[in-house]
Amino acid sequence: MSSSKFDIIVYGATGFTGQLVAEYLAAHYKGDANLKWAMAGRSKERLASVRDAIGASADTPLIVADAGDPASLKAMVAQAKSVISSVGPYQLYGSELVAACVASGTDYLDLCGEPLWMRQMIETHEATAKSTGARIVFSCGFDSLPFELGVFCAQEEAKKVFGAPANRVKGRVRTITLTVSGGTAASMRGLFAAAANDHSLVALLRSPFALTPGFEGPKQPPGNRPVFDQELDSWTAPFVMANINTRNVHRSNLLMGLRYGKDFVYDEMMLTGPGEQGEASARRITAANTSEKMNSSGPRPGEGPSKEERENGFYDLLFVAIAPDGRQVRVAVHGDRDPGYGSTSKMISECAICLLRDAPEVPAGIWTPGAAMGDRLIKRLVDHAGLTFSVEQ
């Protein structure tokens, strides 16, 4: 790959999230002569318009590539050390690109939160990726990076305090401003449509171990109804992204050689507070999560939160590792932008830089970002992407 023309190609740069990724690279790596990157999409004219709108250099290379044209994808990845893809739903538009990257030994990073498609890609391509040298890294945005790394940090602290990783970790959302874009809405609708059309996929979709082929851990908390958490003295409500985040955390555990143990239990919920008010909030959130929030009247692909919403957004997550004797370790993860877009665009960009510069020795295969890059990725996210990781007393 040393002869590749570009270090990173941002594929889907004319889409809502892809444009934010390109804007981040243009702004934060403008003076970095050692980083060669390009923008790719279906229309050269639209790419040029986005390039100008985000203030990228006028000589930023533009590449025409289309998910419906496998030859164009092969030509694109042949020029790259790595490709960032924001073109979803991935189950509709991602398979040919992953296949092309695997075949050419090109690294690939995406924002996928579609466990059924991810499982299919693992089963189809993992062996070949290991033989060609490709490093395929799914879920490099808000799903599921802060959660995967939050558990990682909590377990590292647990080893210091308890002398061993905890077999029980709770992920809890304390505060969040979460705005859904049209692309995310389309991905979620596609996920449930796939399961509805093929009932054999329902059990896989429900399994916490959907992304750990060959490994099945202990029974996990369902996380689908309001529950009072005695240890945290708060009511909790289901968290809409838990169905992908928990799967990625268990895959990370597997990829790291069951670092958290074979009996590891993890769930994610939203904290709503104690008492009657906390219970009422938990029930209200549960009802909203089970409504038709992602129906066809929602945002369309290409639409998403405003610049003001992205910049004023934030999130505050808590990870509690619990020892068998009841002792606790608590780690907080904070992000300084709207999680799904303002923060996500920074996170996936820094994942790509980290894989390229800080973790060249990571073996080929299909990875979660935390399992692949660990502490090096945490440092880069703290230094560049507005995230903080802190131990709470």
Image (cartoon, rainbow, N blue to C red):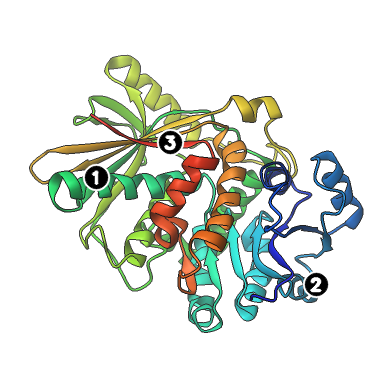
174 relative to 131, above or below: above
SS type, badge 2: helix
Query: First in sequence: mark 1 or mark 2?
Result: 2
- Amino acid bearing label 2: Ser
N-term mark: 1 or 3: 1
Residue at the (65%, 58%) spot, across then down: 84
Q: Is residue 238 left or right of residue 323?
A: right
Give amino acid for label 1: Glu
Quadrant of the frame with the C terminus: top left
| Crowd rating for badge 3 (residues with CA inside 10 Å; few <14, some 14–19, many 20+) | some
Eye-nearest disc, 1 or 2: 1
Q: Secondary structure at mark 3?
A: strand
> Disc 3 residue type?
Thr
Q: Residue at the left extreme?
A: 325
Please name the residue that numbered disc 3 is placed on.
388
Name the mark on residue 72. 2
Name which quarter of the figure residue 252 lies in.
Answer: bottom left
Instruction: State the CA–CA distance, disc 2 to disc 3.
Output: 39 Å
Q: Where is mark 1, residue-wise? A: 157
- Residue visible at 80% across and 72% down in the picture: 72
Front position in the image: 366 or 25: 25
Asked whether, in this view, residue 33 is left or right of residue 378, the answer is right
